[in-house]
Amino acid sequence: MVLTMGGGLAASAQPCMEGRAAGYPCDRIDLLSVIPLAALGAAGTQANDLWGWADSETGREFVLLGLGNGTAFVEITNPLTPVFLGHLAAHGEPSPWRDIKVHKHHAYVVSEAADHGMQVFDLLQLRDVSVAPVTFTETIHYAGESLSNAHNIAINETTGFAYIVGSNTCNFGFHMVNIDLPRQPKFAGCFAADGYTHDLQCVAYDGVDSDYRGREVCFAFNEDTLTIADVTDKANPIMVSRTSYDGIAYTHQGWVTDDHLFLLLGDELDEKNFGHSTLTRIWDIANLDRPVLIGTHQSASPAIDHNMYIRDGVLYQANYRAGLRTFSLNAIADGRLLPVGFFDIYPSDNASEFNGAWSVYPFFPSGVVAVSGIEQGLFLLDPHP
């Protein structure tokens, strides 16, 4: 069964039965819908990162999908019939790298394209779309300190700061921006002590390390190290620790558990460079000055792991050609992950190549999980409890 959306075809709901859903290999994850790139006005380009926004006043849910030529906005309040609301063009040239995060009701978009800076987009506009798709314009544009060529952005929603990384500023490290007033973002400082940062997560630290409890701490993935920084004082950030590991190829991304006791880390090039299967490293971060690698989880697939996030004790990991993989964290203290399910959006093979699932967003109140497929488009999935 298919439905027409904006000139493309979107597959409708299919439960995962006998290891398949609409032809996709799966285990304990159902397919709700698929919107191909053509239906998002993105034929001839590719998808990359994505994020989500849940409108707290209306209960409506939206996916913000990065594309080579901009950002697509899709309402998924009914995930069986998602609606492509419109498109925000890139600021400047197209780029295969785009990253989006949300604070309150504004989206913040960066790209590696020259002169892109940071786009700020008021998401309340999505409420009022009556005839879709709409061609949106950015609400404001931020280019403080001549910001350009940014690879990624993280936002600490507790403190109201954005952290732009991999840009032409701050020695490629953290370009910190106060976004408490979203239409008046202000440069707040740099963390430049460890060079290029590829990705990071910043939290109001509430773990067991009493030296940093109540501080703002960032966990950065810096190509060859896990680097931890105290950024409470934006004018004087402090490097807490810088830790490498055996078998390093490209320290890419990771996420901390809700109790701030453990961190999961993905290396983007180790599978391809060294020929082993998908490897996820498990760190004990009870002492932020001395993180300890306590275990690794090795999957059967040789696919490359990419972005991963944790919600309610479950790890959601985008594995390029192996699609979405989910793991229980019940045994994380023992240095182990327990496989829960998967949904493979690239059925032809699980080779260690850069196709398929770029990222996953598992934080919608409804429980719907969104996955971005580089060549495929947007997948909406329903993991079994």
Image: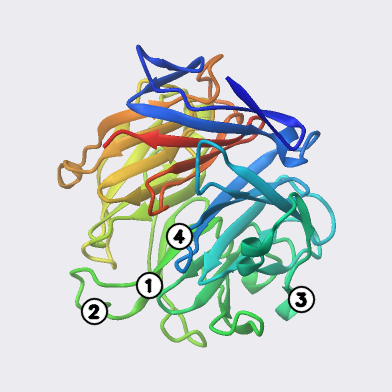
Question: Residue farthest to the top?
Answer: 18
Gap between marks 2 and 1 measured at Cα: 11 Å
Q: Is residue 115 above or below residue 29?
A: below
Gap between marks 3 and 4 measured at Cα: 38 Å
Residue 303: percent from left, percent from top: 48, 26
Gap between marks 1 and 4 measured at Cα: 31 Å
Residue 326: percent from left, percent from top: 34, 35
Label 4: how many residues lie within 10 Å, few (<14), some (14-19) or many (20+)? few
- Front of the two marks 2 and 3: 3
Circle 1/circle 4 CB separation < 8 Å: no
Work out whether mark 2 precedes mark 1 in sequence or the reverse, and give the earlier one: 2
Of residue 147 and residue 344, the one placed in the foreground of this image is 344
Is 226 left, or right, of 355 in this rendering? left
Question: In the image, what residue type sits under mark 4?
Answer: Gly
Which quadrant holds the C terminus?
A: top left
Is 302 left, or right, of 6 in this rendering? left
Work out whether mark 1 precedes mark 3 in sequence or the reverse, and give the earlier one: 3
- Front of the two marks 2 and 1: 1
Q: Name the residue under label 2.
A: 211
Question: What residue is drawn where x is 52% and y is 51%?
Answer: 223
Work out whether mark 3 precedes mark 4 in sequence or the reverse, and give the earlier one: 4
Q: Name the residue under label 4.
A: 59
Question: What residue is drawn where x is 38% and y is 72%?
Answer: 217
Question: What residue is drawn where x is 42% and y is 43%?
Answer: 368
Question: In the image, what residue type sits under mark 3?
Answer: Ser
Gap between marks 2 and 3 measured at Cα: 35 Å
Q: Mark 1 points at which residue?
A: 217
Q: Mark 3 points at which residue?
A: 146
Q: In which quarter of the image is residue 8?
A: top right
Question: In the image, what residue type sits under mark 1?
Answer: Val
